[in-house]
Image (spheres, helix red, strand yellow):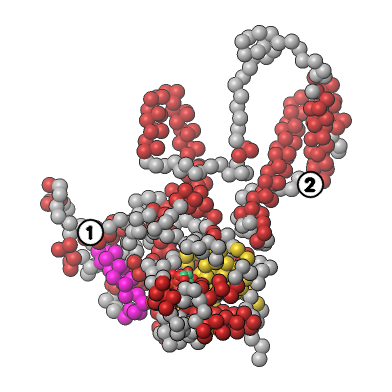
Amino acid sequence: MADPSWGEHAYATLLLNDAYLPGALVLAHSLRDAGTTKKLAVLVTLDGVTADAIVQLKTVYDYVLPVPRIRNDKPANLYLMNRADLHSAFTKINLWKQTQFSRIVYIDADVVAYRAPDELFDLPHAFAASPDIGWPDIFNTGVMALTPNNGDYHAMMAMAERGISFDGADQGLLNIHFKNNFHRLPFTYNVTPSAHYQYLPAYRHFQSSINMVHFIGPDKPWRAGRSASYGSAAYDEMVGRWWAVYDRHYREKEISQLANGSGNYNQAYESQKNASLADVKFDTPAGGSGYQSQAPRQIFPWESHQPKPTRSFYGDEPELQPQTPSRTAPAAKSTARSSVTKSPPKSPASRTSDNKSEAGTGSWTTYSRTNAWDEVPGISKYADAVEKHHRSSSRGKEGEEADDDEEDEEARGFKKVTDFPTETERPSLPVTPAPVPRGRDSTGKVLPAAEGVPPQSEWMSLHKCGVADVEFPVKDPTAQLEKLAQQQSAMLLRKLGGHKEGFSGGSVGSQTRIAQSAPVVLSPRPVKGTAAAATRSLERQMNEEESGKS
Ligand SMILES: O=c1ccn([C@@H]2O[C@H](COP(=O)(O)OP(=O)(O)O[C@H]3O[C@H](CO)[C@@H](O)[C@H](O)[C@H]3O)[C@@H](O)[C@H]2O)c(=O)[nH]1
Ligand SMILES: [Mn+2]
């Protein structure tokens, strides 16, 4: 019988036990929300993953594929990195046995996709991966584009049986097997934030090109809980993106289960549940009373006679913040498969510095105090421009106040110093030279007439004869000027078109040859036919004039 998945492209992840179930679910949702057109597969070891978990996986994955666990019987090297829990990471080798797929993009379960990197399926290379942050000459095995084949599979199985791996897990084995025979993907496909080392300026500069974030190490977002802070704004932001996806699909369900007193929780949610309890207990009718003793000590006198709060329910609260913005399609795009819950995207990724002490004051404390869009360069640039315009128009009347505004803005840290104009923006920056009086220099001295400049009448007819297929009404100077302005902008567009090509090639590295790289920054209409010929001819004409003058 023909296998219907033969030759298909599929994203695949791995689930060895229920402990990573929240990760696997969030990963799948993040890809679907981003509008992927590819199938989703999860490899599961049935000795570790429960039936309940498989039911959940089936709501969002197209294929749940049981695979044999491959354990490292010589796990000594795992202790070198303090990750004894990775004793069965060799199970990833099963990916190369999935020859029903022509191409697999493997993604660890601790990854959240900011956009769906479907272009990785079109790479011509048999194997591709991003650099590892701990040793950038090798690749990280959390994101890999691969072509399943029995040769690699058997070679790596032979290594696994002998425990050949410098870290005791799959990354140490795969890097020995592939050595330098891997195509190096940009880091943006596997951004591995570290709470210990963060190159913040680079993060701010490149954050808009992040494709996927991978939470390496033992502290996964779902273990630390929604409100944990890692002491790094960048890290917290990325964890916030993971929670935004989680909340979009599961927060409402979680809350209704708690409100119903349903204790029927999957074990994998244990730690998560505790964190959620802290977050939601005051949203639920029954929640408040048991926790009054945790209310903070009174500080201000009016706190003793504050009005009694009226009951409020989850869903009544005002929308404090929109969904974390993403360059991906909205949640509504997700398919019918993601029918676990139909949570509207109302819960933001909430990050607070110390939720535990604030828990007693209610769930609103877990909302972020920043706007999610503060980090979107396009929006902050627009806001900048609006403020600047406002300032310059008010400066005339109330100059001093306007200056104060500017100081405030800096104090608020509104400006991001790495927020440079992009390549495509730079040429369009307006230049307004100071007016120089006609026929005089800056000191007012009368200048001699320029030599070799044709009189105005000739200047107009000169252009007429140079431009093919374009009729110039020589006698009408206004129309003439308009025409010139149009040609001027056509030329500029053509120049920018050249920039665009360079940009899309460079964004992923030209050697990666990634097809249809998604975000087109600027798409000028091609200047066609006679108009193009006219523009070229005009350009030539102007060049000749230029050289003729000097
Ligand atoms: O108890 C576990 C442990 C792991 N996994 C799966 O195995 C993957 C790898 O484990 P993970 O905790 O994500 O490892 P990392 O912290 O990311 O550590 C690095 O080192 C690992 C071992 O070499 C590689 O597998 C990773 O890709 C690499 O990023 C996970 O994402 C899951 O898909 C489970 O399902 N359950
Ligand atoms: Mn991982």
- Magenta residues, dominant SS class: helix
**Dot in front, 2 or 1:** 1
Kindly tell me whether residue 61 is visible in this rendering: no
Instruction: Please state which of residues 183 and 307 is positioned toward the viewer in this rendering.
Output: 183
Instruction: Please state which of residues 140 and 331 is positioned toward the viewer in this rendering.
Output: 140
Give the residue drawn at x 83%, y 41%. 533
Position of 376 relative to 540 (above/below): below
Which label is found at residue 357?
1
Residue at the spot of label 2: 528
Position of 278 relative to 376 (above/below): below
* Residue 155 coordinates in the image, percent (x, y): 60, 82
Q: Quick check: is 154 in the magenta stretch?
A: no
Indicate the amino acid at tag 2: Lys
Give the residue drawn at x 53%, y 42%. 420
Q: In terms of secondary structure, where does tag 2 sit? A: loop
**Quadrant into which the N terminus falls:** bottom right
Give the residue drawn at x 62%, y 79%. 152
Residue 465 falls left or right of residue 39: right
Q: Quick check: is 273 in the magenta stretch?
A: yes
**Magenta segment:** 264-283
Q: In terms of secondary structure, where does tag 1 sit? A: helix
Indicate the amino acid at tag 1: Ser
Instruction: Please state which of residues 442 and 177 is positioned toward the viewer in this rendering.
Output: 177
* Residue 229 coordinates in the image, percent (x, y): 33, 59
**Quadrant into which the C terminus falls:** top right
Residue 474 falls left or right of residue 176: right
Q: Around disc 2, counting alpha carbons within 10 Å, would you say few (fewer than 14), some (14 to 19), or many (20 or more)?
A: few
Position of 482 relative to 80 (above/below): above
